Amino acid sequence: MNTLTKIVKSVCTSNVYPRLATAFALILCTLGLGVSLNAAGATTITTFDAPGAGTGAGRGTTAFGINPAGAITGFTRDANFARHGFLRAPDGTITIFDDPNAGTCSASCGTIGNGQGTRAFAINPAGAITGFYTDTSGRCHGYVRAASGTFTQIDAPDAGTGPFPQGTFPSNITPMGINPAGVIIGFYVDASSVQHGFVRAANGAITEFDPPGSIFTDPNAINSVGAITGFYFDANFVGHGFLRTPDGTITSFDAPGADMTGDGNGTFGVGLTPSGEIEGVFVDVNGVLHGFVRSNAGTFTTYDVPAAGTGAGQGTLPESNNTVDAITGQYIDGSFVNHAFVRSDQGGISTFDVPGAGTGAGQGTIPLGNSNTGAITGEFIDGGNVIHGFLAQGF
């Protein structure tokens, strides 16, 4: 088994999106369900399913990124598990899109068929969307979709040309993989199935990079000035966060309390503000997840949602931050059910669940992106393990 196989799940073939799964060895229809979550009635939740989304277990709609205007992007899994990108306009209109070169093979094609299609993860203020697609041979390529709807393919120079796990993948753990200037980050997997980072300038130039000592590099977020954060694994399978400045200087960091003994635990940079504040997650020696904020001076604040579970694979998992330091994510309770949280820039934490979310292990509410207007988007998994999108407003 090669190194990549040991520490990642298949992002091309998995039927459940593997947000940070490597680190923890562990949705035309709008259903206007405006639900007040507080006495003042200021917070509402709208759930939605994109046209063509499958209605069986493991299928549906994942809303991933939201821009300041309220446009949301993400992707669906249809009845045959093929993926399709979508753009939900602020008025709720949903447009489905597919990269022209993406495969759309049905489940009858087997593993490669299940992995084919177009995934969308991030959208910037100008409406540019980035993600990756899987072609008919099972190879993955990055793309950027302009607001006009035109596609440009992205392939890192040293990306492997075979089927998955080779190829090019703009950031697919967080919705912060493209900045306002159109600079895109992500990773590529070479012909030896080794994962490396890349940054693509707005003019298309690609720079490849790895932190010193990395055997697996995963950039997760880029801010407006071009700084990048993410994580890497060293030869002992310890995860370390990193900060790459616009001039290419890379600094690694470890959160206090992070397990440094291996097994895929450690520190994972997730988001980054314009001022250089990093938010992320660390895994302790018992396999419990905890949130952290690293200031631009390098000091750490750690936090846990009070209701989060305290067993292995449970805890607090931040997914995104906006530019004014508010963080959203999920906490996993003692029964492995997912619930949403929001942490303000002052450290106050509030929680919510989307009506209709399932209450079984692996089900629940999973926020994935937030905007400066107090809007949060993401997915919820119902009692039948069907995935739906949501938009929560008023935070």
Image (cartoon, rainbow, N blue to C red):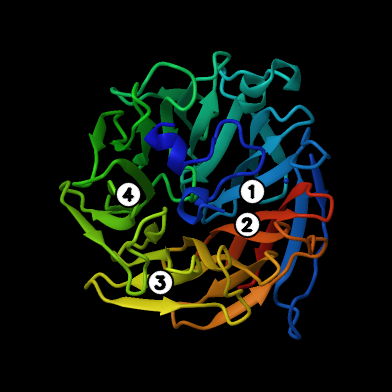
Would you call the spot at circle 4 few (<14 residues within 10 Å), some (14-19), or many (20 or more)? many
Q: Look at discs 1 and 3 and give the one toward the viewer.
A: 3
Nearer to us of marks 2 and 4 is 4
Q: Are marks 2 and 3 in contact (CB under 8 Å)?
A: no
Viewport quadrant of the C terminus: bottom right
Q: Looking at this view, is 260 or 161 the one in front? A: 260
**How many angstroms separate mark 1 from mark 4 (CA)?**
26 Å
- Left or right of 159 on screen, residue 359: right
Left or right, 342 with reference to 196: right
**Which element is circle 2 on?**
strand
Contact between marks 2 and 1 (CB within 8 A): the answer is yes
The answer to whether one can see residue 253 in this image is yes
Q: Residue 310 appears in which quarter of the rendering?
A: bottom right
The residue identified by callout 3 is 292
Q: Inspect the image, locate mark 4, and give the three-letter code of the amino acid beneath it.
A: Tyr
Q: What residue appears at the point 35 percent right and 50 percent down from the top-left corner? A: 237
Q: Amino acid at mark 3?
A: Phe
Q: Which mark is residue 232?
A: 4
Per the image, label 1 sits on a secondary structure element best described as strand
Label 2 or label 3, whichever comes before in sequence order? 3
What's the distance in space between the residues labelled 1 and 3, CA to CA?
24 Å
The residue where tag 2 is placed is 377
The kind of residue tagged 1 is: Ala
Q: Residue furthest bottom?
A: 39
Q: Is residue 325 visible?
A: no
Q: State the mark number for residue 63.
A: 1
Work out how far the residue at label 2 is from the one at label 1, CA to CA, in angstroms.
6 Å
Q: Position of residue 28 (x, y in %)?
A: 79, 39
In this rendered view, identify the residue nearer to me: 231 or 89: 231
- Dot 1 or dot 4, earlier in sequence: 1
